[in-house]
Image (cartoon, rainbow, N blue to C red):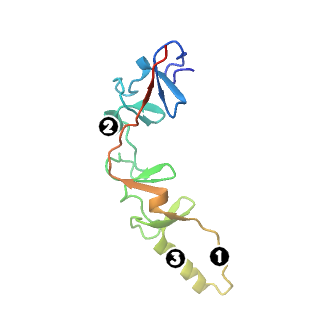
Amino acid sequence: MECFICGKSTEQTPSVVIENKTVYVHKGCFRCSVCGCRLDGYLIKNHELCCVDCYQNRSVNETCQKCGKIITGKIARVDGKFWHPQCFICSLCNKPIEGDFIEKGQQHICLKCHLNEVQMKSISSSQDSTTSSIELNTLNSRTETTDEKMKPNDITKNIQS
């Protein structure tokens, strides 16, 4: 096996096994990619190993998709993108989305506005309305909102001789 960090063989040197025993790292290479400290636990940020302090440091935290500022408290995450909860807003009413929402292209629309929009279209349409297929998204299932600090992953040490 090759070391995830340096690319050299891990067969003759002590190593650490991470990521469900699929990634090997020499003990000497098992360091934070930001500050260089030895790692007891780790977090992965941008495909690099980080210590908890550097992960929580401004230089590696997520930035909000709307305002571009670092997110340090609660976070709203949808499809791998991040927002401050107050920045994750409905494209129609400009209020923060706190529950179900609809995605239309790049727009996020709260359920209340979507239902109002559908109702207005059905009133103004003289033709039979057809129901289009929509995907209802729920803040709880597609979006994570948390204010907990990240905790380091447990590591499994595998000393090879």
| Distance Cα–Cα, label 3 vs label 1 | 12 Å
Circle 1 — which element? loop
| Residue under the point 51% across and 73% down | 114
- Residue type at the position of mark 2: Asn
Report which quarter residue 127 is drawn in: bottom right
The front one of 155 and 114 is 155
Residue at x 55%, y 30% (from the top left corner) = 22
Residue on which disc 2 sits: 57
Residue 157 in picture, x, y percent from top left: 43, 25
The residue under label 3 is 115
Q: Nearer the viewer, residue 85 or 123?
A: 85
**Crowding near the residue tagged with mark 3, few <14, some 14–19, many ≥20 C-alpha atoms within 10 Å:** few
| Residue 64 position (above or below residue 105) | above
- Alpha-carbon distance for marks 1 and 2? 47 Å
> Which amino acid, mark 3?
Leu
Residue 49, compared with residue 101, is above or below; it is above
